Amino acid sequence: MKRAFDVRLAGLLAVLLLAIAAGCGGGDEEGGGETSTGGGGAANVSGSVTILSDWTGPEGESFKAVLDGFKQKYPNVNAKDRPSTNISQDLSTAIEGGNPPELAAVPNPGLTDDYQSRGALKPLDFMQDALSTDNYSQDWLDLGTIEGTVYGFFFKGANKSTVWYNVHAFEDAGVDPPDSWEDLTSAADTIKASGVPAWSIGAANGWVLTDLFENIYVRSAGVEKYHQLTDHEIPWTDQSVKDALQMMADIFNDTDNIVGGRDGALQTDFPTSVSAVFADPPKGAMIAEGDFVPGVVAGQSPAKATTDYDFFDFPAIGGSSSVVVGGGNEVIMFKDSPASEALAEYLASPEAGEIWAKRGGFASPNKNVGEDAYPDEITKRVETPVAQAENFVFDMSDLAPAQFGSTDEFTILQDFFKNPDVDATAKKLEAAAAKAYK
Amino acid sequence: MGQAPLGGPPPPRGLWSRWKGALAFIAPAFILIAVFYIYPTIATIIRSFFSNSGDEFVGLDNYKQIFTDDILLTAIKNNAIWVAVVPAAVTAAGLVFAVLTERIAWAVAFKFAVFAPLAISLFAAGIIWRATMYDKDPSVGTINHVIGVVKGAVSESGVLTEANASTEDLAGSSKSGFTLDETLQPGDTALLGLTAIPPDEVPSDAEQAVDPQPVQGGIAGVVWRDFSPGGGEPGKVEPGELGIPGASVNLLDDSGKKVDSATADSDGSFAFSNVGSGGHKVAIASTTFAEPFTGVAWLGSKLITPAIIIAYIWTAAGFSMVIIGAGLAAIPRDVLEAARTDGASEFQVFRRVTVPLLSPVLGVVFITQVIGVLKVFDIVLAISPGSTLNDATVVALEMWRKSFSGQNQFGVGAALAVFLFLLVIPVLLLNIRRFRRENVGG
């Protein structure tokens, strides 16, 4: 009968469609089956482990090389890296959905606090020996500790207390790399007189402005106050904050000493601000940003290290002692298994750091990654302070709750760049921080 | 088909047997709709009444935040601007293009050009406009480049673009010119030093600047680039410092009136001879400087929303043109001919005959645009640089930002989604009613 045939066909179609829907909508990454055997040699560990990170492009290639090193040591473990361009979003959604990866390397330790408070993280007690002052400075160890328990450690570090400059522009102006704030401001004036704006600031990216604030604040107010402000134990309306903001205002008010002037800089993003300094002829003489600048330069221009570009350490303010403001990627664990523990331990070892250090664009917080792991002079100078610095503090906006550190602080400082009103800005920062640090 | 009707009404089972075929076909689509539309909608509505982390019930707090948070209020205001301006503009643009392309010879090529942007996503359109058209730097952004060229053709060029004075006694700016404070008597000399001149801007015929020699009964001076590596000594002509040939210098009498002018030589020197008695001043004329055009800040906070709207209209006008063009083709030619024979001008034909006949089509385009514009998201995100995102933001973008861009404010995001839904519903109902009326009517 025609009708019966129609119904059966329709029924078949329905079942087929449902099966397809179920198949696609289903699980994304599987944690994988594991066969765990008691502790024992590397060859006994098997299973699979996924690590989510924000390393894409050349950084992604370097991290793959590190994972290859791991695979050689642990041939039976299937280690996968999952690069993401929006890691905080991916992780929040994965955790909400109940399906996080085993490990993640996050660039904002502030997020780690959030995950820990949701109960999503596993403590790293099994790594007690590796995570000791034999291998890491106390500053680095404290950063991975929440309420006395170690939840994370840092695999990659970054030195953000550097100022990169165009060597030729400095020669034409006849200035030497300054080592104090007064020298820096008078050098900037001389550079302006030589016909090149001294500062290239990518103000379209808010983190460029927060990095500048942090470098100034830790030197003008001291490390102690820096930690207090990070934890919001002192308000943003404190005089020390206003003093630092005033120093920034002095730079921002000298608008013809900034590439593009006020309006132009607000629309310039970080990569463009780097190319302005290393263009020929240079549009700006220096850029106050971290050790990732050479990577950007390499992609944009034939400028060479030391001959065309070089850096100096962010100058001391009022005789402040040497301190490095830096960033880094923290490795945290969501699911423990022999495979994920093995990968975590490997990443904490000097070998893992050395693989990437050789390729450049990497600083290891591990003290035991020797100077010689770094490929050239300039990389050595810029990356070794990350592990060896007398004082190391982490980027404040990365430690703050995301609402403040990744959003409000950026827009408030961008408004400050447009209109350098110190008191009003301090009040706005305090109001935003009060909301976020609840 | 084969059943012979018995006496009396058909048994209720007939309903099932009539409908089960249809139901079987609808079932897969219905299940997909239920899973991907109905369930998420209900879940979002419920979620909007809970806090951001999802644990506590907060009632209407999230909705209250929509009307108290500055950024969200800006988003609502921007959406209002979009709805007021864009659908009308897109419909009008489409109407004009559709009518024009009816008549011109190369209609197909023109239609293609206008329609092509529709083939790319709004996000891609946004990136194109941001990177090529709106960049503030005139050597990158097309619009600013054109403005710069026009400006350059209109205004005269100067020897230098801009400069600063090297000493405090030279007051002024490149816009107004620099005047030397000192009052000079015949036989005096004037040193006019300038800094902030990039070395490659110094004219190629410049030579080492020289100290001016006093001229009997006249005033002599030098205009030069007063900078040596390390800063040098401002106000003093030093070896290695070059003069600025071609600089215009004015001689002013005590009342400030210009009485003479001169042009600097290749070593920067100039001289006014036979200056009358009494005090005089010298000034570097503003015509020496051609203020470089630094570009209009299209992506700055004042112009960002108009900039995005222009890019959106560029993308959407093609859609509107095609639909209205189809409507236009459906208008019977004899009505237009009759109007023309009756003596109506082209414009009158357009206004009184074409447009009223097109009004259903125009209505369709307009309402579709209203719905699209209420939901606009990707082009706003693509064009706005981080620094002006808060000025350009719209409700749909805030919904995404609050929930997913690291802020994790899922409760507020859900409330915004529901809010947007409530805004769009009346427009949708209007559309549905129009369709129903049209179907019933014809």
Image: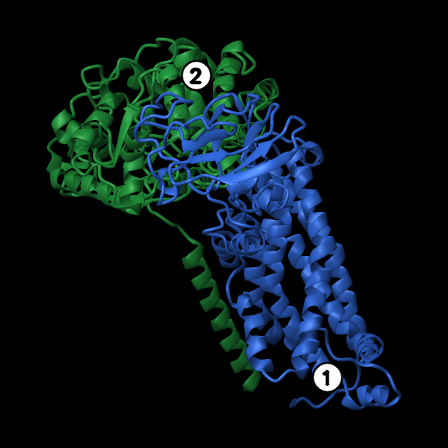
Chain colours: A green, B blue
Question: Hey, which quadrant is residue A216 in on the image?
Answer: top left
Image mark 2: chain: A
Q: Which residue in the structure is indicated by mark 1?
A: B330
From this view, report whether residue A9 is shown above or below residue A24: below
| Residue displayed at 58% across by 37% down | B260
Neighbours of disc 1 within 10 Å: few (<14), some (14-19), many (20+):
few
In this rendering, does residue B407 appear at all?
no
Q: Are marks 1 and 2 on the same chain?
A: no
Indicate the position of residue B294 as horizontal and vertical percent values. Answer: 52, 44
Q: In which quarter of the image is the N terminus of chain B?
A: bottom right
B68 sits to left or right of A304: right
Q: Do the residues bearing badges 1 and 2 touch, measured as CB atoms within 8 Å?
A: no
Q: In which quarter of the image is the C terminus of chain B?
A: bottom right
Neighbours of disc 2 within 10 Å: few (<14), some (14-19), many (20+):
many
Indicate the position of residue B285 as horizontal and vertical percent values. Answer: 55, 37
Front residue of A328/B231: it is: B231
Q: Element under label 1? A: loop
Q: What residue type is labelled 1?
A: Ala
In this rendering, does residue A204 appear at all?
yes
Q: Which residue in the structure is indicated by mark 2?
A: A217
| Residue displayed at 56% across by 45% down | B299
From this view, report whether residue B433 is shown above or below residue A431: below
Indicate the position of residue B372 as horizontal and vertical percent values. Answer: 65, 58
Indicate the position of residue B64 as horizontal and vertical percent values. Answer: 71, 33
Image mark 1: chain: B
Q: Which amino acid does label 2 sit on?
A: Tyr
